[in-house]
Image (cartoon, grey):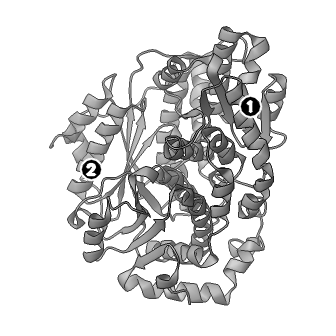
Amino acid sequence: MIDSSHLPGLSANLGDYQAAVDAALVEMADRAIMRRIWAKDHTVWKPEPVEIGNRLGWLDIAPRLEAEIGRLTTLAKQVQADGFTDVLLLGMGGSSLAPELFAKTFSAEADGLNLNVLDSTDADAVRAQAARIDPAQTLFIVATKSGGTVETLSFFKYFYNLTAAALGTENAGQHFIAITDPGSKLEKLAADYHFRDTFLNDANIGGRYSALSFFGLVPAALVGVDLSTLLARAQSVGDEQAAFLGAALAELAQAGRDKLTIAASPPIASFGGWVEQLIAESTGKDGKGIVPVVGEPLGSPAVYGDDRLFVYLRLAGDVTHDAEFERLAAAGHPLITLDLADRYDLGGQFFLWEMATAVAGHRLGIQPFDQPNVEAAKRLAQRMVAEYMEKGELPAGDWADVTAATLHQFLAQSQPGDYIALQAYVAPTPETDAALLALRAALRDRYRLATTVGYGPRFLHSTGQLHKGDGGNGRFIQFVSDLVEDAAIPDTAGQPDSTMTFGVLKLAQALGDALALRNANPNRSVIRFHLGQDVAAGLKALQEEG
């Protein structure tokens, strides 16, 4: 049996749930689960290998990519020598979350380029990035596994035209690199438009398991991350830690503690966004699911129901959350603490959580590598766009009054064990961040329910699978806003013609998502608020007592 008190970097206080975890570990050892995962045995999860046998490349990607470190560091040095100062990554979900983490976690200490991520189809957000950059000094990373992600290709066409207008079509391609799977549409686009470089990823790696592949390491190299150290830490994780963490996640979820509440030391806080996608997309299906709760402010024990498992990622020397977690553990809430020596231990955390999620999938009886419900919202959004193309307008939405009374009437129907999902199809700004944080804290304290927040359509590639594939106990609150100014999406890169805008695309995605939620399960409850242009004021109005 694995004893958590002897696992380096991991400690656990699981109380009465420890016995179930211990029993799970014994059963896993008897069935040689860890050995079979390493052997890429699909029967650990399902009898058939569909979307399993071709999704296990993450297991050994770290040692394989050590051979690419020279190529990646040479690229970083060359673009700096060529006068580039900024990188703008154009991607969604698994293509954007690890790069965002590297930028937020390492850029202050690394000697690299300034990297930003665009993963919002909000026209104001797109225009804000365009206004911020100088195309002459910017390298654009176009990142999509499939090569056909509509948001990513829309970003590419927009910023290619912007760059070509400033520098000429003969020079524009040298400001772009691609990361994609072999044979994808993007690989051909990269050749047609003379990209500076193209990185073809292992096709046997799904997006949410791709942090240690080219999708994560190309941006990391440009930021200035020491890739050798990062990959070495990724390979230092023991099977015992992953088996324990995965068994704990699954056994506590099955006992009702399915709201995995994650907090981290401030310098590594962005890890939460990456692990949120991994857990939500991998476990939220077949009417089951572990709900990752990230970014929710920590409160007193009294504001939590009995559906929480807390995980604390603590950086050496940081005690920011120690007292809060000590109070939660003393009140009987189960707690797992993961200690990191420094930021580079995030390399180990990537692999630890990937393996633990695979283990949790086994224990829950689900297939953790597919995303069967993600396509539902995409198809409905495409239907909305088709209607727009035919009629010149989108279907009318069903909007609720922006009042606290309306919101609280909706939430009064909640049951213990439900969760509140705030879905913000608005421009991500610091003011909106603060307003959403205040609203979720107020709702958590009032209803003792877990709260999540996602910007749309970003969250469709992160938590959207969970929202539509779990047991149907989410309370979904969708926000949309009016644009300051729309932005046209070129029909073809390098050409001026446009038949659709980012504003239309975003609203189509919001409408499609709401319909997909309602279609997925009749128990899912959805309310929609139209906040106008002053998003922060609208969110504050909903926070009032009602």
Residue at screen point 59% across, 66% down: 352
The image shows residue 311 at horizontal and vertical percentages of 42, 66
Which of the two residues, 468 or 67, is positioned nearer the viewer here?
67
Which of the two residues, 113 or 51, is positioned nearer the viewer here?
113
Q: Is residue 211 above or below residue 147?
A: below
Residue at screen point 44% across, 88% down: 19
Can I make out residue 361 in this image? yes
Q: Is residue 67 above or below residue 528?
A: below
| Quadrant (top left, top right, bottom left, bottom right) of the N terminus | bottom right
Q: Amino acid at mark 1?
A: Gln
| Quadrant (top left, top right, bottom left, bottom right) of the C terminus | top left
Label ID, residue 441: 2
Which residue matches tag 1?
Answer: 78
Quadrant location of residue 71? top right
Residue at screen point 78% across, 51% down: 202
Q: Secondary structure at mark 1?
A: helix
The image shows residue 190 at horizontal and vertical percentages of 79, 29
Image mark count: 2
Can I make out residue 269 in this image? no
The image shows residue 253 at horizontal and vertical percentages of 45, 71
Residue at screen point 73% across, 54% down: 205
Q: Is residue 357 above or below residue 182?
A: below
Confirm or deny contact between disc 2 and disc 1 (CB under 8 A): no
Q: Residues within 10 Å of mark 2 (few under 14, many from 20)?
A: some
In space, the residues marked 2 and 1 are separated at their CA atoms by 46 Å
34 vs 281, left or right, is: right
Q: Residues within 10 Å of mark 1 (few under 14, many from 20)?
A: few
If you read the primary sequence from the N terminus, does the residue marked by circle 2 or circle 1 appear first? 1
